[in-house]
Image (tube, rainbow, N blue to C red):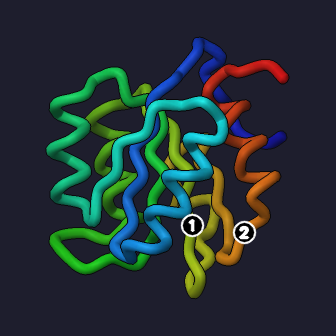
Amino acid sequence: MPGHYNHAKILEVLVVEDDALLRMAAVDLVELENLVVFDADGADQALELLALHSQIGIVFTDIQMPGSMDGMVLAQHTKARWPHLQHIIVSGQLAPTKAQMPDGAQFFAKPYDTGLKGQTLRAMAGIQV
C-alpha cells in the first residue's frame, strides 16, 4: 500500500465532514475497525478537537466544506502543526494531485470502497490483520 505510515498503534481518528449522514457513515466505518472516533462538522471544530485530544493520529476529511478552510487546507495546516498526523482525504467532486496532499496522505473518491478504506485505516493505525 502506498504511503509512509507510522506503525505505532494509533487508536483515535478524527472524521471531518459537513454532511451529517456522510459523517455518520464515516464514523461507523472507523468504529468497525475498533478505533476511537471523534467527529467534526468543519475545520474550526476539527482544530478545537485536535488541540484537546493529542492522541488523535489520523484525520479523515472531506475536501469541500464550508467555513474558514476546506479539507485540503485543513490537511496541510494540521500536518504542519501536528507532524505525526496521518490523513485520509475524500471527495465526490475533486481529485487532488499528490503534490497538493500532505506527505503520506491517501485520497479516496466518493463513493469509496469501504473495504479498501478500512484496510487503509488499519495500516495507518499500525493494526495487523
Which numbered tag is attached to residue 109?
A: none
**Image vertical order of residue 64 relative to residue 124, above or below:** below
Residue found 29% across the figure and 50% down from its top: 77
The answer to whether marks 1 and 2 mark residues whose Cβ atoms lie closer than 8 Å is yes
Helix, strand or loop at label 2? It is loop
Residue found 72% across the figure and 31% down from its top: 123
Q: How many marks?
A: 2
Which residue has dot 2 on it?
Answer: 112
In the displayed structure image, the side of residue 77 where residue 56 appears, left or right: right
Give the residue type at disc 2.
Tyr
Mark 2 surroundings within 10 Å by alpha-carbon count, few (fewer than 14), some (14 through 19), many (20 or more): few
The quadrant in which the N terminus is found is top right
Foreground of the two, 93 or 122: 122
The quadrant in which the C terminus is found is top right
Which residue has dot 1 on it?
Answer: 90
Q: Position of residue 111 (x, y in %)?
A: 69, 76
Residue found 46% across the figure and 62% down from its top: 24
Residue found 34% across the figure and 51% down from its top: 39
In the displayed structure image, the side of residue 91 where residue 42 appears, left or right: left
Q: Position of residue 3 (x, y in %)?
A: 71, 39
Spatial distance from mark 1 to mark 2, Cα to Cα? 8 Å
Q: Residue furthest top?
A: 8
Q: Position of residue 109 (x, y in %)?
A: 67, 73
Disc number lying in front (1 or 2): 2
**Image vertical order of residue 108 relative to residue 82, above or below:** below
Q: Quadrant of residue 125?
A: top right
Helix, strand or loop at label 1? It is strand
**Image vertical order of residue 45 relative to residue 125, above or below:** below
Label 1 or label 2, whichever comes before in sequence order: 1
Give the residue type at disc 1.
Val
In the displayed structure image, the side of residue 5 where residue 55 appears, left or right: left
Q: Position of residue 114 (x, y in %)?
A: 74, 58
